[in-house]
Image (cartoon, rainbow, N blue to C red):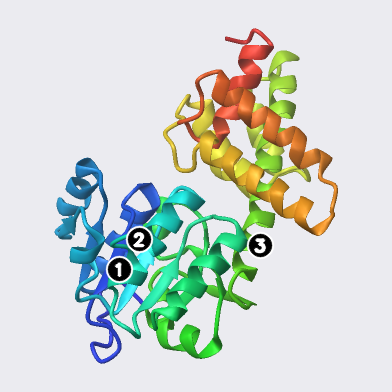
Amino acid sequence: MSPSASPDRDLVTRCAVVGLGNMGGAVAARLHACGFDVIGVDLDERARSRVGSSGIPATATIAEGIAAATVVLTSLPADAAVLDAWTGPGGIAAVAAPGTFVVELSTIGPDTMREVAAVARRSGLRPVDAPVSGGPAEAAAGTLALIVGGEDTDLDEVDHVLAALGPRRRTGPIGSAKVVKLVNNMMTMGNVAVAAEAFAVGLAAGVDATTLYDVLAESGGRSHHFTKRFPKALADDFAPGFTVRLGEKDLRLALALAESVGVPTPAAATGTELYGSAITEGLGDLDIVAMLELYRRWSNQR
């Protein structure tokens, strides 16, 4: 759906976005640009003001925000926040009208997703498991990769909303999409950490940073996140698209998932320690490419 397209008003009258951080705010803006009737929900007045400047009304309370919504999307930083928003007093399950679609976009554990979905279904709601791959820029452009799980009939009926955000790939029942997202993020965090370590070696050995990037960006060791993020690092731009702190959180979730299915994960365990070290060094709220800054500090390049 292009930004100028209008949604089918017989299918959706209002979308509520709960959680207006970097990603949730961008999702709300994208849906608004596509012609959906959008309202935002966030406890943080600054987050509400940011979307308000784009013409999106926002409130601090879930009950007020979702009162007229037929689709509620949640984009929140951790399992505890999702549990509270979906199942807490005054939460979505308690106040949403039966038949409302509830689309969970966050990166959380699959067991948490199954738990909140079960509560939602008991309230007559239609839960959708839909974590996203990509950042705020992709959300704004409608090019997020959505990893989607749930009942096929639910996914079919809410697809016109998800299509505004990007292409969708179905993974199976509720919870399966969160599994795939955690596996993806295990790979992402590992790719960035290894690239930062290797790049720091090249810099320490005297290769010009721009030359090193240009060659590696066309060589076999490159990755999507290397070519996407490292140009910013070379300009000392660590503005967060996805923070080190969130990366470490996702790795911990992945370790818990791996333990639950009996798969050893020594590489992910090491990666979790590395991202934890970056947080200790004060880099937690910077973009994950700040892992390069960690290695620069460790090797006295700063």
Asked whether 202 or 280 is in front, the reply is 280
Quadrant for the C terminus, please.
Answer: top right
Q: Mark 1 or mark 3: which is in front?
A: 3
The picture places residue 37, in percent across and down from the top left corner, at 20, 73
Query: Residue 69: which numbered mark, if any?
Result: none
> Which residue is outermost to the front?
89
Residue appearing at x 34%, y 47% in the figure = 21
Label 1: which residue? 31
Q: Mark 2 highlights which residue?
A: 27
Q: Quadrant of residue 41?
A: bottom left
Residue 187, visible in the rendered structure: no
Classed neighbour count for the residue bearing mark 1: other residues with Cα under 10 Å, few (<14), some (14–19), many (≥20)? many
Find out whether the residues at labels 2 and 1 contact each other: C-beta distance under 8 Å. yes
Amino acid identity at mark 3: Val
Which one is earlier in the sequence, the residue at label 2 or at label 3? 2
Q: How crowded is mark 2: few (under 14 residues within 10 Å), some or many (20 or more)?
A: many
Amino acid carrying mark 2 in the image: Val
The quadrant of the image that shows the N terminus is bottom left
Number of labels in the image equals: 3
Q: In this view, does 204 lie to the left or right of 181?
A: right
| Residue count near mark 3 (Cα–Cα under 10 Å), binned few <14, some 14–19, many ≥20 | many
Mark 3, residue position: 179
Query: Do residues under tags 1 and 3 come within 8 Å of each other at their CB atoms?
Result: no
In the figure, 218 relative to 276: above or below?
below
Marks 2 and 1, how far apart in space? 6 Å
SS state under label 1: helix
Q: Please name whichever residue, 162 or 5, is drawn nearer the observer in this view of the structure.
A: 162
Vertical relation: 98 (above or below) 168 = below
Residue 292 is situated, as x and y percent measured from the top left of the image, at 61, 26
**What kind of element bears circle 3?**
helix
